[in-house]
């Protein structure tokens, strides 16, 4: 699925990485535990999380994750945005709960990692 499609379907806002909206995402992983995220080795992955801090961006960088969806109306700080843009990580915000966002993305064809 294209990043632009999920942004549209989730009524989401792109905070960083607006040039990457035509890229494909194949898999999704929902977690607030960054230690679980560090175990992943999957390409074209969307991280779905409610944990909005610098550690989320750093963990994504270490795990080669290029797309992060922040749920529950969590807002990205300027420091997070700067670090993400510096590392070519697309940041997306939506107001839906993690469960609802995952349900919508699953209906759209996003595959789970496990």
Image (cartoon, rainbow, N blue to C red):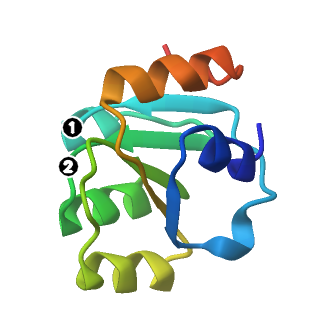
| Residue 99 in the figure: left or right of residue 21 | left
> Would you identify the image quadrant in which residue 88 lies?
bottom right
The reply to whether the C-beta atoms of the residues labelled 2 and 1 are less than 8 Å apart is: yes
x%, y% of residue 31?
Answer: 28, 32
Q: What residue do we see at 18% from left, 63% from top?
A: 53
| 97 horizontally vs 13: left or right | left
The quadrant in which residue 112 appears is top right
The tag on residue 10 is: none
Badge 1 marks a residue whose secondary structure is loop
Question: Vertically, is 86 above or below 66?
Answer: below
Tally of numbered tags? 2
Task: Please name whichever residue, 84 or 18, is drawn nearer the observer in this view of the structure.
Answer: 18
Q: In the picture provided, is 78 more to the left or to the right than 113?
A: left
Asked whether residue 13 is in view, the answer is: yes
Q: Is residue 39 left or right of residue 20?
A: left
Q: Residue at x 37, y 79 (%)?
A: 81
What is the residue that sits farthest to the right in this orientation? 22
Which label's residue is closer to the chain start, 2 or 1?
1
Q: Secondary structure at mark 2?
A: loop
For the residue pair 8 and 56, the one nearer the viewer reads as: 8
In the image, 108 versus 30, the foreground residue is 108
Q: Which residue is mark 1?
A: 32
Instruction: State the image coordinates of residue 44 (x, y, percent, origin top left).
Output: 66, 43
What is the crowding at mark 1: few (fewer than 14 residues within 10 Å), some, or many (at least 20)? some
Q: Position of residue 95 (x, y in %)?
A: 35, 44
Query: Where is residue 5 shown, x and y percent of the image?
Result: 73, 44
* Residue topped by disc 2: 51
User: Could you tell me which residue is drawn at 20 percent across and 62 percent down?
Assistant: 55
């Amino acid at each position: 699925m294209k990043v632009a499609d999920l942004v549209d379907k989730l009524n989401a806002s792109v905070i960083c990485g607006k040039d990457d909206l035509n890229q494909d995402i194949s898999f999704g992983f929902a977690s607030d535990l960054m230690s679980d995220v560090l175990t992943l080795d999957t390409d074209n992955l969307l991280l779905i999380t409610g944990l909005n801090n610098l550690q989320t961006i750093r963990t994504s960088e270490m795990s080669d994750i290029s797309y992060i969806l922040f749920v529950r109306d969590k807002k990205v700080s300027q420091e997070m945005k700067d670090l993400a843009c510096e590392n070519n990580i697309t940041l997306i915000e939506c107001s839906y709960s993690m469960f609802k966002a995952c349900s919508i993305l699953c209906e759209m064809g996003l595959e789970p990692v496990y």
